[in-house]
Amino acid sequence: MTLIACLSLLTLLPFIALAQRGGAGFGGRGRPPAPPSTEPFEAHDFNGIWWRTGGTREFNTEKGGEPELTPEGKKRFEANKPGYGPRAVPPALGNDPLGDCNPDGLARILLFNRPVEFIQQPNRLIQFFQYHRVLREIWMDGRKLPEQPDIARWYGYSVGHWEGDTLVVDSTGFDDRQWLDNLGYPYSDQMRLQERYRRTDHDTIEMRITVTDPKIYVKPWTSQTKHWKLLKNPSEYSAPEWNGLIEELCAPVDEVDQFNRRIRNPAGGVIEK
């Protein structure tokens, strides 16, 4: 792992701690979840800022267990060295693509415990992720996914449609240099990813993800149910004078500065006051 990888871990520690506590105002370990909201809501209206909470930051399944990998899948999985989970290695020995400030990829950013804004327009749904300031388009105009995408994308090509009160999003055309989750599960350029969203009450959206990748997995793999909670007053999360998402980027120049102030300078006897 490069210097940036170690530096990224340093700057992410406060945010990891926040995510493990369950986030601002959403309970967390040791506290019961909030009761379902009784406020009226429109099932097809996802507009607003939502915080991904409930469930883990790993893909996982409802009943646990590991997916069955193909020979190619096993090869790639064993080559991935995460800094988290049962196969964790020291950061300096790992190779997590996030450690070098690479894009998260669609699956990982969906699993990350960070706010995302849903913006619904007549022909598309936009997801604006706070982490890395990622803007994703889900086309709702009836177009089909490209059969042979000319350019692989970190976040793929996405189209959506409604099945009753469930938003179904299908995506393909992925760049396979990222991982599926923090545990190092891989995917290939053949992956098709489907998300199913349903607004269960005024304050909650539930989501499940299914990965179909015959090159890596013997059969489709469906995640445990993840939940998004509505941020009714985003200023309580960001800042009193600012109502919206904050900027949260992995910037190499910031990582080097963190390393100098926290490690290199103290090691050389330079103590900042």
Image: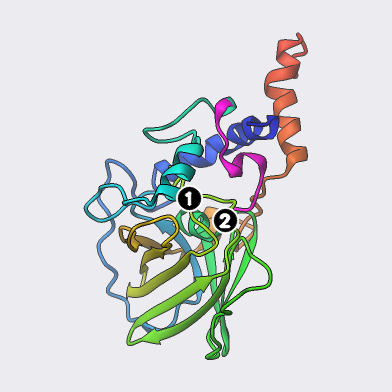
Location of mark 1 (residue): 186
| Disc 1 from disc 2: Cα separation | 8 Å
Instruction: Name the residue type under label 1.
Output: Pro
Label ID, residue 176: 2
Q: Secondary structure at mark 1?
A: loop
**Front residue of 93 and 161:** 93
Instruction: Name the residue type under label 2.
Output: Asp
Which stretch appears magenta? 93-104
Number of disc labels: 2
- Residue at left offset 34%, top offset 54%: 54
Residue 102 appears in view: yes
Whether label 1 touches label 2, CB < 8 Å: yes
88 on left or right of 121: left
Q: Position of residue 4 (x, y in %)?
A: 69, 34
Ranked by sequence position, the earlier of labels 1 and 2 is: 2
80 on left or right of 218: right
Label ID, residue 262: none
The colour scheme applied to this rendered structure is rainbow
- Residue at left offset 59%, top offset 26%: 92
Crowding at dot 2, Cα within 10 Å, few <14 / some 14-19 / many 20+, comes out as: some
Q: Is residue 48 magenta?
A: no
